[in-house]
Amino acid sequence: MKNIAFALFFLLALTTANAAIYTVVNTNDSGPGSLRWAIIQANSGPNPNIINFNIPGAGPYEINLQSPLPIINFEVDIYGYSQPGSFPASGSNPAGIKIALNGTAAGTGASGLNMSGNSCYINGLAIYGFETGIMAGGNNNVVEGCHIGLDATGMNPVGNAVDGIIITGQQNRIGGADASARNVIAGHSRSIAIFPYAPANRIEGNYIGTNATGNATIPGNGFDGIAVSSDNNTIVNNVIVGYSSNNILITLWAAGFPYPEGNIIQGNRVGHHADGSFSSFVNNCQGVSLNNGRNTTITENVIFGNGCQGVLISGGAATGNLVSNNSIYGNAGLAINLGLDGVTPNDPGDADLGPNRLQNFPVLESAKANASKTKVKGFIDTSNPATVTVEFYANSAPNASGHGDGETLIGTASPKSNGKVKTNLPPVAPGTYLSAIAIDSENNTSEFSLSIAVTGPGGGLGRPFPGDPQVAASGKGNAAIPKASVFPNPFSGQATIAYHLPEGRPVQLSIFSSNGQLLRVLQDGFQAAGNHQMRFNSRGLAAGVYYYRLIAGEEVHGGKMVLKP
């Protein structure tokens, strides 16, 4: 018997010079070859250890746990993708996960995996049925390519009772820059929670609140997508949608705890799906909410489709929060709201205090466009205006309040010392709505100004369809430019736009969505006389109607293109 036991251990645990490798070969709750056995073995020494899977058959396999797994105390790598037949996500294609951990019978308070050790790595697992999917209590741990709160397919919600992931350590990473690292996390009261005193974690490239395609909201999402109560964390390039309170929340944990500072929210899609579509469920929440968060950077995000504010900044300690170069539009509330009280009126001299020091917003007086520029005049009443940056946004429609939205950033300007603003921006179509925000030298960002409609002959950005007198949806443009041709049309994948210039001139060729959002600029500069062809690649765009606009000198032409399913 002793020799048989030794032989079994030899088969299941191979030791390399740097790490012991333990292989899970069955779905048993315990005993040799089980996941519980492998974690116990990996915990037996301080050296880095590896857990692989090689369960016979096609799978997927469900490991039904009758009690919590042991806490992982040392550096352990758990490779769910080592199971034959499994594979990580690539591009927009979901992962193929073969190993699932089910904690329905594991008991109250159980976690799927609990990492108190440092530098652990987990990939390729579906984790559901626990109170918390993953606890990351150590430092420098990584979770990639998992389905948390969903089954192995990533399409069906199973949920963990409270949290998907809780982070109490520092410098942990959830997800990553490559699609293969993408976690799908949904079906929880909070999908990711970063507790106080847990700084410098990174949440990147995940689908949060959706299924594995990223294009459909999972039913059963609770209050918050990501909730952060610590400092210097980064939330970047995620899709976050479908929560009832906040898609992203930066919040003071409780009285007596430090205010969360220095967090970065960048490049996320907030309130809608990966393909830009709206949630089929009530998305009745704030897009991004800062409750006494300080010195937060919110930039390069697309925030639309939220049932309340786009960005809400509240609490008297919430100062120095930068909201810059985002696309914030189509939310039920304000694009930016300082305090949950609607539009905050400007005060003389900007002396009042509150969230972001209640920075006064700019006042736009006029906006006149021609084919080469949009001339804007306005002013701002604030202390030391010359230190303020004003960002200007073009909108296809104003916010219901009249203030904002902030759909497309088209330029910036610095006021003079007397507060007057006079600048030339890129050309936009007449009827485009212009709005602006002000950012002081400490990054306190205002609410949006009252929108004004651009007048003049127009050009450049804006809507290349009815409402723009120079470019009709019929495709009939200025006769000085022979009608551009699109082939094939309808098209799939790629279309070519061909046109002839009778003489050399500056040319701008842009692509717009059916609601007027600028999607691509194919050409922006001087072109010589003659025939020209520009290719439009539709990668990442849904089937439907799109418009092109061709501006050549003072001449404007546009037309419709149809992208096939």
Image (spheres, helix red, strand yellow):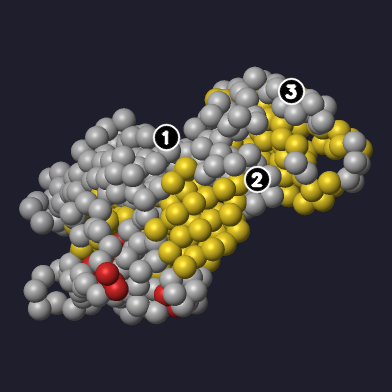
Quadrant in which the N terminus is drawn: bottom left
User: Going 55% across and 59% down the picture, which residue do you hit?
Assistant: 411
Q: Quadrant of residue 504?
A: top right
Residue 277: assigned label: 1
Percent position (x, y) of residue 249?
Answer: 25, 59
Using the image as rendered, state which of residue 385 and residue 265 is in the foreground. Answer: 385
Q: Position of residue 236 (x, y in %)?
A: 43, 60
Which-is-in-front pick, marks 2 and 1? 2
Question: In which quadrant is the C terminus drawn?
Answer: top right
What residue sits right under mark 3 in the picture?
488
How far apart are labels 2 and 3 at the CA level? Answer: 32 Å
Q: Which residue is mark 2?
A: 370
Give the residue displayed 48% in from the left and 70% down from the top: 415
Closer to the observer: label 2 or label 3?
2
Circle 3: residue type = Pro
Q: Nearer the viewer, residue 155 or 391?
A: 391
Closest to the observer, 206 or 383: 383
Q: Secondary structure at mark 1?
A: loop
Graded by Cα atoms within 10 Å as few (under 14), some (14 to 19) or many (20 or more), the crowding at tag 2 reads some
Relative to residue 351, is residue 257 drawn left or right?
left
